[in-house]
Image (spheres, helix red, strand yellow):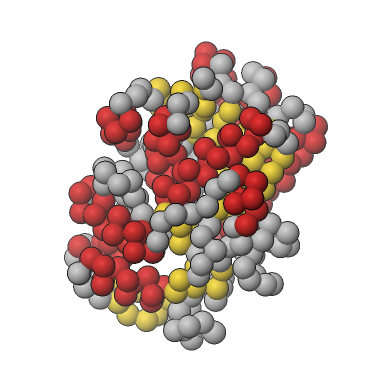
Amino acid sequence: MKNILVTGGAGYIGSHTTVELLESGYNVICVDNFSNSSEKVFDVINDLTGKQCTWYNVDVCNIEELNKIVAAHDVNCAVHFAGYKAVGESVEFPLMYYQNNINSTLSLCEVCLKNNVRSIIFSSSATVYGPPQYLPLDEKHSLSATNPYGNCKLFIEQILKDVNVAHPALNIALLRYFNPVGAHGSYRLGERPKGIPNNLMPYICQTALGVRQELRIFGNDYDTIDGTGVRDFIHVVDLAKGHVAAIKKMEADPGCFVYNLGTGNGTSVLELVNTFMEVNGVDVPYVIASRRVGDIAACWANPEAAKEHLGWEAQYTIEDMVRDSWEAQKALGVCT
């Protein structure tokens, strides 16, 4: 039995991954400071899985407390989700992002090395590719970033690569996510941000609920199928399963790896909104606004490396994603 540490385990992706880990037979120890989540999530996780997830209200930057937890539980692998994640906020408060996201990673690395943890999986992002030079994006594409959030992901990837060179016994998996949406099939877990959403899907859901007056679509003059931006939307359960696959890969074949986790399909913002309305039978009032600075026309993954080496492939459709997002939003309500 393997003991897995999950940082940011109460968050959107962290909570879904914790469920998949527990259901795959792992012991899970979560740490979270609940800055954008709730400890009640763990009651739901335990109820859904029939298993006990151990959790601590601890900031990952607190190296002393983190060390006590890792040492006490004989952790084999750390899955690192903890960190600030809003692009716009990162532009406004860059120092806050660099201090928190990078320092938490440095803290985790020190603790893992001290306690002989075998593997770290990092939740990276397609933002590390910068403006696409070609599509679909594969792992060989050049790297860059256009905002502090993306820079944090890029810097942390390099830190972890350097740590692996110096300490090859510590395996590293860098998983580059595309655009997670959807929710657990019970509709008891989902994306439930505090305040104004930073991501598209919760904004669509809250507009459909009437919490928001209208959805703003930023730009309809891109060189795409309908002029709106195109992205690779992936169901959060597929994404969570990718982490289980990465753990199994490192158990059998250690090293330092980089994999895209996406569907390989591009869907425009307008296509997503129209599919949401059609599948769920609800209206989503929207207006077209000016392009946002830094946005790109299109971005989607080449996921072939993950398919070949992890035995992982996305299973859920866009219709599944919009249905599950809406049902979970109705069931969970809106954070106030």
Judge from the rendering whether residue 141 lies leftward or rightward of residue 326; answer left or right: right
Across and down, in percent, residue 325 comes to 31, 56
Q: From the top left corner, tell me how far across and down residue 257 is, in percent.
A: 69, 44
Report the residue at 48% width, 83% height from top: 225
Front residue of this view, candidates 5 and 136:
136
Identify the residue at horizontal 67%, vertical 37% (top origin): 172
Residue 80 appears at what percent x and percent y? Answer: 55, 37
Residue extending furthest toward the top: 72
Left/right of residue 269 with respect to residue 121 in the rendered view = left
Q: Looking at the image, is 181 positioned above or below residue 64?
A: below
User: Residue drawn 52% across and 27% down?
Assistant: 4
Position of 297 relative to 332 (above/below): below
User: What residue is shown at x 21% (from left), y 73% (from top)?
Assistant: 283
Q: Nearer the viewer, residue 161 or 305?
A: 305
Q: Is residue 19 left or right of residue 293?
A: left
- Is residue 17 at least partly visible in the picture? yes
